[in-house]
Image (cartoon, rainbow, N blue to C red):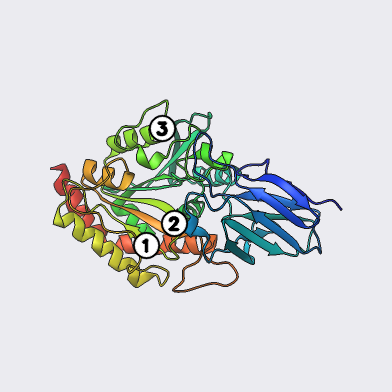
Amino acid sequence: MTLSISSAFDGGNIRLLNIADTRIDLEIVKDNQSEFHQWFYFRLSGAAGKPVELRLTNCGDAAYPLGWQNYRACMSYDREEWRRVESDYADGVLTIRVTPALNSVWFAYFAPYTMERHHDLIAEVAAHPAVRHRSLGQTLDGQELDYLRIGEGPVQVWLYARQHPGETMAEYWIEGALEKLLDEADPVSRQLLDKASFHIVPNMNPDGSRRGHLRTNAAGVNLNREWHDPKPERSPEVLYVRDEMDRTGVDFAIDVHGDEAIPANFLAGFEGIPSWTEEQGALYRRFSNELVKRSPDFQTKRGYEVVKPGKANLSMSTAQVAERFGAVSMTLEMPFKDNDDLPDPEQGWSPDRSRLLARSCLDALHAIIEDLAIKALEKRR
């Protein structure tokens, strides 16, 4: 059977360069109107029982070359269960070596979260009597930007994911958060929904997700550099969300992401904003410490350099939301590789672990919700 490569599907990304026997040369397609590239997702057909060598040849000038070191690609036969496979990186080329058991097999940078899966999630959750759903508006490609609201409490909590569409672990995290919040038997969730209103945007970048982008929307724009001045013709997704935040207010926010290079889960805060207060910072540190207690998958030793006072980048959501609303705001980063502190040789960091981390984050939020409620009341006086 002839070998073939395809990526003409939801979230797919690869370009075939050459097939020579069982060696296949490929390259990752850049985001539209952008130099960013790192996300790949493609199907290999006709390789059952054959030792195949898949060579991704343009990894050296990818967005984050350090992301390939000690990285192992994801492979699946059913697109539900994804396993890590032998991969090595040298001289700008990522080589995946595998002998597939079946003639149809998929490979991806991380377990994909397609727009079809997103629509299934929205259809299921929107039907729940506790959930209010609406579209905040349409994207440049004409897709809806889905928004969910759960709870009636005074603390305004925002959870949003996939500003960078290739960071698919972020929407798996949202799945886990929704599962916990809508579990009527969970006492933590019951108290959270009494104390807080949750505003949830599961996917802030539908266009980039469907197009198979790593980091940008349909116009080639990095949404997480638009929060200071979003424009409808350039970054409508940010404009819709920020406008809704202006209507609801924000007391606590998590912007969920994935990091290509650092093999750990960590938070990035808002230390450099002009209006920084110690009270705000203390609540952020308390949340981080509570999360350490609740999840062995979370740590505080590795992460980004803390921004110096007054040097925050207000074009990024975490800093803008903290400054604009006086919120306790943060970016949660999860690895594309694995959590080196608690490795899983079969799956690495995975959708299941992303969902479980979301549950731990809500448990940590519960631990500080009373103090957030007091702060929210003081802000509104």
Residue drawn 79% across the image and 60% down it: 102
Where is residue 181, by image quadrant? bottom left
As measured in the structure, the alpha-carbon distance from the residue carrying label 3 to the one carrying label 2 is 22 Å
Q: Which residue is mark 2?
A: 259
Sequence-first disc among 2 and 1: 2
Image x and y of residue 71, in percent:
54, 63
Name the residue: 33% across, 36% down: 242
Residue 6 visible, this orientation: no
Residue 378 visible in the shown view: yes
Circle 1 residue: 266
- Distance between mark 3 and mark 1 Cα atoms: 27 Å
Mark 2 or mark 1, whichever is nearer to me: 2
Question: Dot 3 corresponds to which residue?
Answer: 235
From the top left corner, tell me how far across and down residue 50 is, in percent.
80, 63
Which of disc 1 and disc 3 is earlier in sequence? 3
Residue type at mark 2 is Asp
> Does the residue at mark 3 contact the one at mark 1 (Cβ under 8 Å)?
no
Question: Looking at numbered disc 3 in the image, what kind of residue is underneath it?
Answer: Ser
Is mark 2 in CB contact (under 8 Å) with mark 1? Answer: yes
Q: Nearer the viewer, mark 3 or mark 2?
A: 2
- All told, the count of numbered labels is 3
Q: Residue furthest right?
A: 1
Between 210 and 263, which is closer to the camera in this rendering? 263
